Image (cartoon, rainbow, N blue to C red):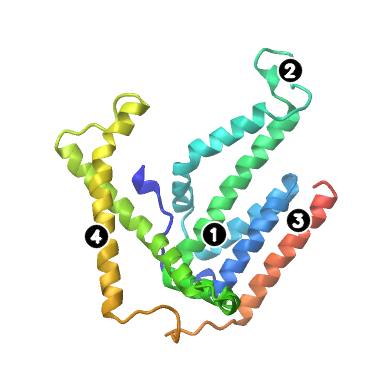
Amino acid sequence: MLKDITLGQYFPGNTLIHRLDPRTKLLCVVLYIVALFCAKWFVSYGLVAAVLITCIRISRVKLKTMTKGLKTVYIIVAFTAVMNLFFTGGEPVADLPILRHISQAGIYAAVFMVLRIIMLIMGTFLLTYTTSPISLTDALDSLFSPLKKLHVPIHELTLMMSLALRFIPTLIEETDKIMSAQKARGADFESGNILRRARALVPILVPLFVSAFRRADELATAMECRCYHGGEGRTALHVLRYARRDFAALALFVLLVIAVIVLRRFGL
């Protein structure tokens, strides 16, 4: 299960999606989320899904990789679907003991909520798969730079976010190594009820926290040795510049939002 968590991983490439400015990709993801939450019916969701599939095909990220990251949220998706299915009011679909509590509106609400969550996760995954953590830091620093006039430490905040994202795969790999070592010593993480499995994970947490704090201390020491003192006066090796493809991508996603809003007004 731990190997199925792919959040924070970056897959290098030279596709059109990879070559887009990271600021453009962040803005496109925001517009994509707006369009996704404005979608109302199957036509709108189909349009948003078509754009997502097209972006995945262009990025050349394997669909298996995208769906692999969804395994960790299947329980959340299933729970959300059940809640919408049974707790949405309306006429029951049939006069039977179980179906008496399920309405047609509840079925539609469950389906649309599942589609929304899955497409939302896949869209954000595609951003991290095609953008390096350093590029994300530069993009966030550039987009939120006006807040620096209010003395908000934007560079430090974006650096912490990118470091946290960067160390997710590292911590997952460390957890997997600790679990393998514990299993070699006779530990059992798979048998028993939920409480017993939770107790079995306690011996993993202590070495994992020790390892995480040790890595954080080593990183802080390395940054101090390189005279890091925040974002004041810093320059970038690769200066971010918008190109024609960036404006074309932004225009495409703006049109997507407009199209979804128009379809929503017509009940589609």
Residue shown at the point (63%, 81%) measured from the top left: 244
Q: Amino acid at mark 4?
A: Arg
The residue singled out by tag 2 in the image is: 94
Left or right: where 205 falls relative to 183: right
Q: Secondary structure at mark 4?
A: helix
Q: Which mark is residue 214?
A: 4
Structural crowding at the residue carrying mark 2, measured as other residues with C-alpha within 10 Å and reported as few (<14), some (14–19) or many (≥20): few
Distance of mark 2 from mark 3, alpha carbons? 33 Å
Asked if disc 2 and disc 3 are in contact, CB closer than 8 Å, the reply is no
Q: Amino acid at mark 2?
A: Ala
Q: Is residue 231 visible?
A: yes
Asked if disc 3 and disc 4 are in contact, CB closer than 8 Å, the reply is no
Q: Secondary structure at mark 2?
A: loop
Residue extending farthest front = 151
Q: Is residue 60 visible?
A: no
Q: Secondary structure at mark 1?
A: helix
Distance of mark 3 from mark 1, alpha carbons? 20 Å
Q: Amino acid at mark 3?
A: Val
Q: Earlier in the sequence, mark 4 or mark 1?
A: 1
Distance of mark 2 from mark 4, alpha carbons? 59 Å
The residue singled out by tag 1 in the image is: 56
The residue singled out by tag 3 in the image is: 260
Left or right: where 21 falls relative to 202: right
